[in-house]
Amino acid sequence: MRLPVAAMIPWLACAAPSLAQAWTAPPAPRQPMPFSHRVHVVDNRIGCTSCHPNAARSPVAGIPSVERCRGCHKFVKQDPEQPRLTEEMKPLLAKLREEPPTTIPWVRVHRVPDHVHFSHAPHARGGVGCAECHGEVEKMDEARQVSSLLMGWCVECHRRKQVEKPVERARITDCIACHK
């Protein structure tokens, strides 16, 4: 016997947190060229929104354009103290010399299912730091997913945030907050 979707919702809301515990982080996807967040964020003190300016105000943080990379790498072309980094920059510098410029086909690391309505904007306004969902990206030489982003994981976070500000966040655990 198949249950109607409406009958499954209470079960899913209860089971989702325990289902999130069984998740295993996937390996970092293979990218078209090396890119180290550690080198950019820790070593060179470049903030997240310098490359992902839409993170605080739109549904997706976005992948930086070639023009954004070119903005810095027209000056930064080598690191004499670190020959490995100079070597790793070569594919990027070749891409930046292309006319007209073409996009770098980066492989997306984080994705929520299409039936989930997600926007970075309310999370940023609510004080959720990048690391809460994306982990310590600033320490990563290869970006990888560290949180499941499954419903149970999100629901647990929403419940914790709701306890912090019960009046302002009264509805963040309602289904419609994420499922439109």
Image (cartoon, helix red, strand yellow):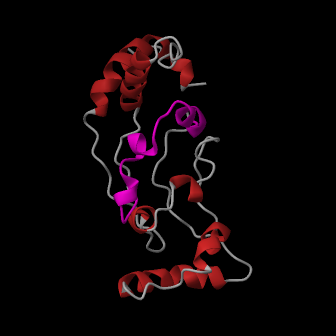
Question: Where 74 sits versus 1, above or below?
Answer: below
Q: Position of residue 106 (x, y in %)?
A: 53, 64
Q: Is residue 2 something one can see in this rendering?
A: no
Question: Where 30 sits versus 59, above or below?
Answer: below
Extreme residue toward the right, this view: 100
Instruction: Name the quarter where the C terminus is drawn.
Output: top right
Residue toward you, 37 or 45: 45
Q: Left or right: 165 with respect to 70?
A: left
Q: Was residue 142 drawn as part of the magenta stretch in this picture?
A: yes
Question: Where 48 sits versus 98, above or below?
Answer: above
Q: Position of residue 27 (x, y in %)?
A: 32, 57
Q: Was residue 58 drawn as part of the magenta stretch in this picture?
A: no
Q: Position of residue 175 (x, y in %)?
A: 51, 18
Q: Within the image, what quadrant is residue 84 found in?
A: bottom left
Residue toward you, 173 or 126: 126
Q: Is residue 99 something one can see in this rendering?
A: yes
Q: Residue at x 64, y 67 (%)?
A: 68
Extreme residue toward the left, this view: 22
In this figure, what is the number of numbered marks?
Answer: 0
Give the extent of the magenta segment: 117-143
Q: Within the image, what quadrant is residue 80 found in?
A: bottom left
Q: Residue at x 38, y 50 (%)?
A: 145
Question: Where 145 sits versus 174, above or below?
Answer: below
Residue toward you, 163 or 33: 163
Q: Residue at x 36, y 47 (%)?
A: 135
